[in-house]
Image: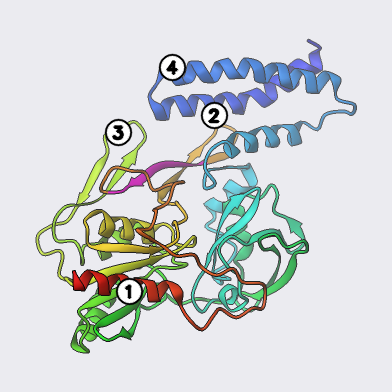
Amino acid sequence: MKIRGRVLVLAVSVPVIAFAVVGGLLGNSALAREDSYQYLRIFEDVVSLIANNYVEEVNLDKVMHGAMHGLADGLDADSAYLDVAQVKVLDKGDAGGSAQTGLEITRQYYLRVIAARDGSPAARAGLLPGDYIRAIDGQSTRDTTVYEGQRLLRGKAGTKVRLTVLRGNAAEPHDIELAREDLAAAAVKSRMAAPGVGYLRIAEFTKTTPDQMKAEVASLTKAGATQVVVDLRGTAFGDTDAGLAAARLFVKTGVLAYRQDRGKDKEAVSAATGDGGIALTTAVLTDAGTSGAAEVFAAALAGNKRATLVGERTFGRAARQKLVRLPDGSALMLTHLIYLTPASVAIHEKGLVPDVAVDQPDLEFGQAPPAKDAMLDKAIESLTVKAAA
């Protein structure tokens, strides 16, 4: 191998070896490290070929960053490689600003919308789960991590961000300009949906959500509700602990969820004395934008036979990440813990399958949703059937 090739291999391989060692330590497995080193020998050959045969002089930084991002791309969408500059921004606590567009995003080739929060600039603009964000302010998101995308969407209140969005099989993308806003926590809303059937809309799970739910259910019960529909469509915001706390209101006994950390026994989160104060027969509405805390909540109720899930398969994003720092100042944002249903089935990257399947309508940009809510009607029907039985 030529000297230039050896230098390049060494420079690029050092952080890659760090990845391999970190992976082995996290798994506490010598076998995992040995497997990683086997691939590193192939990696060395690839780098050597690039260094000695590529038509132009190789840009070392570009090759190194590409290799690091490539490793992280083999994991889930929330795991990512952060370069030195991004780690410094993270350490400063600079998330881009306090104002938001109201989008929760993932990554699938480009950045992709999980959901738009109720009442947010993104929701008012009509952005929907599954929309691809091809560019942010003219910058392609092809190589943008979820972490970086979230930072780019934030800023000072009143500032604007331009998104290039592609929906479904449309041939041409749409340019949408959103003004960032300081968004208050979304409150739980309720109303009577049908005689004897209450309706709860939960757009976000926060520390105050359980208390708000208790108050709203009490009001619904006073109004004559003996059954309730909990609407979690497009609910991708909030903390999983808040989702579990809300689930305790409905589940009197049993396992709510399991937490599974790498290399550890799964940890059961169970109902406790005093839980299960809400006894109303329940249906939960879900769609492709139901994610995170909402999925954990829905899984806890469904797994304990406290609710029927009506709608679409949920997104499948119930996990926690941590930052693993590398010797050169860069870092890996790594998913290290996932949530499992009461039946010990992983939610992350799989989602929850509804008991009663109902598809959300496909909408073009600018098209208003239909006046008739077929999913809500189906949930009310399922509750009626259950009451009659």
Q: Position of residue 353 (x, y in %)?
A: 39, 54
Give the total of numbered labels: 4
Nearest to N terminus: mark 3 or mark 4 = 4
Q: Is residue 283 visible?
A: yes
Q: Which mark is residue 19?
A: 2
- Tag nearer the camera, 3 or 2: 3
The amino acid beneath tag 4 is: Leu
Q: Along the horizontal axis of the image, is 113 left or right of 254?
A: right
Nearest to N terminus: mark 1 or mark 3 = 3
Q: Position of residue 86 (x, y in %)?
A: 61, 48
Question: Of helix, strand and loop, which mostly describes the magenta segment?
Answer: strand
* Residue tagged 3: 264
- Tag nearer the camera, 2 or 1: 1
Residue range in magenta is 333-341
Q: Along the horizontal axis of the image, is 319 left or right of 66?
A: left
Nearest to N terminus: mark 4 or mark 2 = 2
Find the residue positioned furthest to the bottom: 223
